[in-house]
Image (cartoon, grey):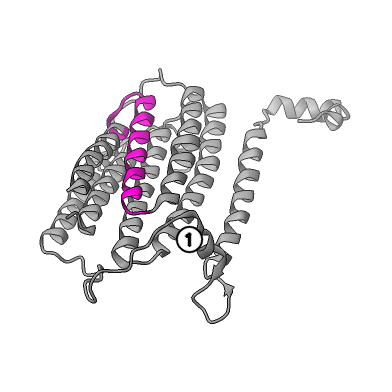
Amino acid sequence: MVTAEWYMTLAAVLFVIGAGGLLLRSNALVMFMSVELMLNAVNLTFIAAARAHGDIGGQMAVLFVLVVAAAEVAVGLAIIVSVFRTRQTASVDDLSELTG
Amino acid sequence: MVELVVFILMGAVSVGGAVAVVRARNPVYGAMGLMATLFALAVFYVVHLAHFVAAVQVIVYAGAVITLFLFVIMFVGVDRAEQMTEKLSVQRPVALVVLVAVVILAGVLVVTDRFDWVLTSGGDPPVVNGTVEEIGANLILDDRAAEPSASRWLLPFEATSLLLVVAAVGAISLAFYRPRRREDRNDASASGSDSSGRPS
């Protein structure tokens, strides 16, 4: 029997991998994909909790997370493209004008 | 038994895809790994009887989001080698320590059986079947009340429409944004009427 704890553990592993990508890579696109990975790991916990509790609220929450993630991707990729058009780079290490 | 096999197979696919996202030098391979992870998660959603969410996951994420990522990767260019050295000297060690600490914490929680939030009293929980009808009825109406009234999800549902409009307007305005260089501005101020009639 695969219990909810197994899915929670898998989601924790996926979340940590995504956090590692966000912290260790410097390409803005790869960091963005890592954020998507972390969002999906949380979605998996929502779905597993919905079944463990017998409450459909978890699935509804996942739908809202999906909507917010889609909006975030649209705006974030537009920002990356406009940064690339002005700076010719997608590396976050080169965007350091705001440091003191 | 079937669920165990599905869990092991799809868990391996999802973790492998996630590692590919983080480790791939070429972002295109990273996007492919992300798509594998999203498909594996959709299979998990079907196992949890969340059919509608699984369909939305495949359509929105694997269909739309990954395609958008691939377009932007092609636009930005993948031949530019990413320098793997870190400018901040403390970033890498601190990040690794934090990640290992989180993994150890999660492992301790699992081993010591401290997931107390899972309801264990009162036998099996009711089976939730996330069909389209069920999701739609929960979004709009609350049929558990004595008389039909608005669901608690109705206001967030309407707010997402506002969010999507704002995101679309923001993306479009960012796409039309042109950085004006200094000589352009001087030309426009010198010639005066030239810039007024021209759409930018």
Main SS, magenta region, reads: helix
Q: Residue at x 65, y 44 (%)?
A: B169
> Residue A91 versus residue A14: which sits nearer the camera?
A14
* Residue labelled with disc 1: B134
Residue B136 pos. (x, y %): 53, 59
User: Quick one: SS at disc 1?
Assistant: helix
Q: Is residue B180 left or right of residue B67?
A: right
Residue A35 pos. (x, y %): 39, 44
Residue B63 appears in the figure? yes
> Residue B19 versus residue A55: which sits nearer the camera?
A55
Q: Is residue A44 left or right of residue B95?
A: right
> Residue A96 versus residue B177: which sits nearer the camera?
B177
Range drawn in magenta:
B21-49
> Residue B49 versus residue A12: which sits nearer the camera?
B49
B10 above or below A61?
A: above
Q: Residue at x 11, y 59 (%)?
A: B111
Q: Quadrant of residue B108?
A: bottom left
Q: Residues within 10 Å of mark 1 (few under 14, many from 20)?
A: few
Q: Residue at x 51, y 23 (%)?
A: B75
Residue B87 pos. (x, y %): 32, 35
